[in-house]
Image (cartoon, rainbow, N blue to C red):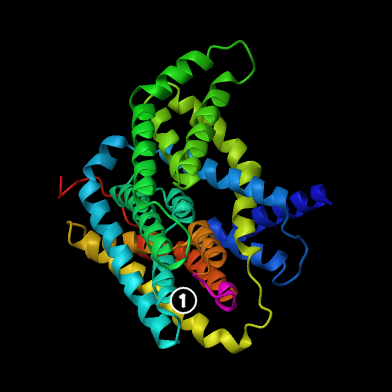
Amino acid sequence: MFFFTILIILLATKLAGDLSVRLGMPAVVGKLIIGVIIGPAIFSWVENSEIIDELSEIGVLLLMFIAGLETDIDELKRSFKSSTAVAIGGIILPFVGGYLVGTAIGMEPSHVIFLGLLLSATSVSISVQSLKELNMLNSRESTTILGAAILDDILVVILLAFVMSIYSGEEVNLMLVISKKFIFFIIAGLMIWKGAKWFMKWLAPLRVTESVISAGLIVCFLLAFVAEELGVAGIIGAFAAGLAISQTKYKEEVEHKLEPIAYAIFVPIFFVSVGFSVSFEGLGEHLGLIAVLSVIAILTKLLGSGLGARLTGFSTRSSLGIGSGMVSRGEVALIIATIGMESGLLNPDYFTILVIVVILTTLITPFLLKIIFRGQTATREYDDA
């Protein structure tokens, strides 16, 4: 049955991706939608399982690793000011929006704050693929989105730890949480500076088949592991690994050999698995709340992050594009929702509703990016350098 599941996923994603491109949309749109269609929500041709989850996680790690490989570190440094403004704007407005909606529907104060934090999360894995298809992954806009997503992840996790230490009844050492983030970025910085070069120099010459790509993947999974152990999302570790490898002479070879591996099987499974969380059962009475939360989730990120970009020198069009790239909550918000359930900060009655909202933000992101960036030339000049 497992092999049949893989067969259906690969065939469905390739056909859906091709149809999406023919209709003028990024291929990722079709791949996301087909996950809903063939998954439990509609036809149930494929079911989620532990092994699909694991393969999906590899897919998103490889996707972010490739993004890191294709990102210019100098541009990432120059975009720090813009990324910070985008990240902060993309936290404040969604938090306020979530807080107001939660208060209006009568949530407890702690649950209201948690909802605001959940809506403040960002996952740019889908945005990365969309920008890649639009040939804008090396643009100033893309670099700003990636930098903002890293900062967003750090700030939201720290704020979540603070809220849990106050409301959940669990003992959370806030200084420990912050210290672990700091340690991760020291390790990542060392890997980008010298560590990856040392690893590649040591492992690449080994007299075994495909030693270079194997060495690159070792660095990727090492930093992803370290990131998760230190309380940072694994995708941030994978992205940092890509940045590190991009500073070595093996960058082109790793990228050239990795893409066939990633896009042949792992990345398609990730895209389809996003739709597996969707369920339409018993949602009729909650459609109004889903609609309101979805609109709030989309507009607050779009405007909040977009305003941060506009204030740091981007054009209105580019600012809206950056805001669009921050809209997707993806797997980051799903992880936060699960933490909320386990810690008592999220009422189980709202879990499925929020999963649907997260999926909707993920589905709409490629559409927004395509519409806003259609025909635009990548920007590489820095007004705020």
Which part of the image, by quadrant, shows the C terminus? top left
Q: What amino acid does circle 1 point to?
A: Ser
Residue at 54%, 21% in the rendered image: 212
Of residue 151 and residue 375, the one placed in the foreground of this image is 151
Provide residue 81's location: percent of width, then percent of height: 20, 50
Q: Position of residue 167 (x, y in %)?
A: 42, 68
The residue shown at (63%, 44%) is 266
Residue reaching furthest to the right = 1
Question: Residue 29 sits in which quadrant?
Answer: bottom right
Answer whether residue 347 is magenta in the image: yes
Residue 344 visible to an observer of this rendering: yes
Magenta-colored span: 345-351
Nearer to me, 215 or 346: 346
Q: Is residue 134 left or right of residue 342?
A: left
**SS class of the residue under badge 1?**
helix
Residue 87 x, y percent position in the rendering: 30, 57
- List the residue tagged with mark 1: 294
**Which quadrant would residue 88 be assigned to in this image?**
bottom left
Residue at 44% across, 27% down: 251
Q: Position of residue 166 (x, y in %)?
A: 39, 65
Residue 145 vs 339, above or below: the answer is: above
